[in-house]
Image: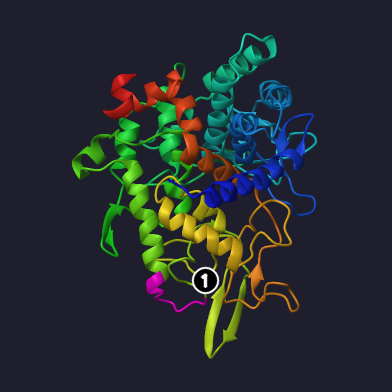
């Protein structure tokens, strides 16, 4: 049982973090800012996370139900009515959406890609809002009806581009991207959604093709399904309770994906204790290596060692890249898997690293104790000046899943999630009782 101090600390962190979605939004269309930098666009992934957070906000008294319904309805109406087609300035195509959208017009920004994973996060958010706002009120019914229409519109088979696995995306100028979803990663949610579609489902063979690219590793005494960045062990779990349900791959390994994420979290901590690259700060209470912004690109000579620092890259454990940059949000998002070590890590981030000070939305996005940062900064080391919507959502949602399993309960009632899991040959646990 958590001590009252830990409960209060988590609820305060959740409240401060959710403030991002209250303020960094265009209320007319529900779009959420990707990053708090000047002239930055919206992110459909951040918008999907916001949709999933509104039920939490109602339950925790952070928004009235009426205000949350108004926000969710504006969001799903925008995506239903926004331009879908092959034009370069549309909002989406084939039921998928561009990664970044203009905050005001909702049109494609930066000639970015039509993103299959970010669209999956958006659709998962819409489905979770639909599962929660299910009262007889006409506006709540409309959220459910539109979320259903959005989900049914996505053409998952088209996203295969004739191949065995799903592509990362598409551009009107050049067609499908060359990359496909391979190796264990956040695409677990994408495949479950794609398999569960009643209109354009992925074939079962696509899931088997994806899992055939997995890597099983032994790191720091833990055998687990490898993925380097910590967020890849978290994002699908925001929505789906993988405790005690197994697909064919995990049945052969004798564990489930939840246990796998627990092991991956402990590998992160063990790596920080070992600290093979001798970065400042790494230890049992200071870890969390994931895709994040960093202090680079730069090369500095520090204490006689030449260090290369990166900007936004997919940092990972144990093989890198690693430049000493840590992300406290990724620690918080592991709370359901390994609460003892996560609570210790959060306590360090709050009280010793002071990563909530001088700050508007909970934690700073990333910090690097090895890099000196700008001269005169209040921390004495590099700290990101920005916040990211993609970081904020998992903190709010995983604190809630840890405390009462709200999102997991909502998605157990979603027939598309249940069907997708069954078509991926998941069995056992709550799925057998559904």
Which range is magenta?
A: 273-280
Q: Is residue 426 visible?
A: no
**Nearer to us in this view, 375 or 57:** 57
Residue 253 image offset from top left, x and y in percent: 21, 44
Residue 100 image offset from top left, x and y in percent: 67, 42
In which quadrant will I find the C terminus? top left
**Nearer to us in this view, 315 or 332:** 332
Residue 187 image offset from top left, x and y in percent: 44, 40
Q: Which residue carries the number 1 mark?
A: 323
Using the image, determine if residue 182 lies above or below residue 59.
below
The total number of labels drawn is: 1
- The residue lying at 64 percent from left, 44 percent from top is 112
Residue 246 image offset from top left, x and y in percent: 28, 35
Using the image, determine if residue 170 lies above or below residue 331.
above
Image-based side of 114 in relation to 410, left or right: right
Using the image, determine if residue 26 lies above or below residue 276.
above
């Amino acid at each position: 049982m958590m001590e009252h101090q830990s409960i209060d600390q988590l609820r305060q962190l959740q409240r401060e973090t959710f403030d991002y979605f209250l303020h960094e939004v265009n209320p007319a269309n529900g779009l959420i800012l990707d990053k708090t930098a000047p002239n930055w666009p919206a992110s459909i992934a951040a918008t999907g996370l916001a949709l999933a957070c509104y039920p939490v906000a109602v339950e925790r008294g952070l928004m009235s139900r009426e205000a949350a319904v108004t926000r969710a309805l504006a969001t799903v109406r925008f995506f239903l009515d926004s331009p879908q087609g092959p034009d370069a300035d549309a909002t989406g195509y084939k039921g998928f959406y561009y990664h970044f959208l203009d905050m005001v017009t909702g049109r494609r920004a930066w000639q970015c890609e039509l993103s299959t994973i970010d669209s999956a996060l958006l659709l998962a958010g819409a489905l979770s809002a639909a599962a929660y706002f299910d009262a007889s009120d006409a506006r709540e019914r409309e959220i459910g009806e539109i979320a259903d229409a959005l989900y049914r519109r996505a053409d998952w088979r088209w996203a295969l581009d004739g191949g065995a696995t799903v592509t990362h995306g598409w551009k009107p100028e050049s067609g499908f991207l060359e990359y496909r979803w391979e190796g264990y990663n956040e695409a677990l949610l994408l495949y479950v959604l794609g398999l569960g579609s009643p209109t354009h489902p992925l074939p079962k063979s696509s899931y088997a093709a994806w899992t055939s690219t997995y890597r099983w590793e032994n790191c720091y005494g833990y055998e687990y399904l490898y993925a380097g960045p910590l967020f890849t062990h978290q994002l699908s779990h925001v929505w789906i309770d993988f405790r005690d349900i197994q697909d064919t791959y995990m049945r052969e390994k004798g564990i489930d994906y939840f246990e796998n994420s627990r092991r991956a979290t402990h590998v992160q901590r063990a790596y920080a204790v070992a600290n093979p690259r001798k970065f400042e700060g790494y230890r049992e209470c200071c870890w969390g290596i994931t895709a994040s912004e960093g202090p680079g690109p730069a090369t500095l000579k520090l204490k006689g060692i030449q260090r290369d620092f990166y900007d936004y890259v997919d940092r990972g454990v144990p093989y890198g890249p690693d430049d000493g940059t840590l992300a406290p949000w990724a620690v918080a998002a592991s709370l359901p898997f390994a609460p003892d070590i996560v609570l210790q890590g959060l306590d360090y981030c709050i009280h010793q690293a002071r990563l909530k000070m001088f700050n508007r939305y909970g934690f700073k996005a990333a910090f690097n104790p090895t890099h000196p940062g700008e001269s005169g900064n209040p921390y004495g080391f590099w700290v990101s000046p920005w916040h990211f919507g993609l970081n904020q959502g998992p903190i709010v949602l995983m604190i809630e899943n840890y405390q009462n399993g709200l999102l997991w309960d909502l998605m157990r009632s979603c027939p598309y999630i249940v069907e997708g899991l069954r078509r991926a040959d998941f069995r056992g646990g709550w799925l057998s009782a559904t």
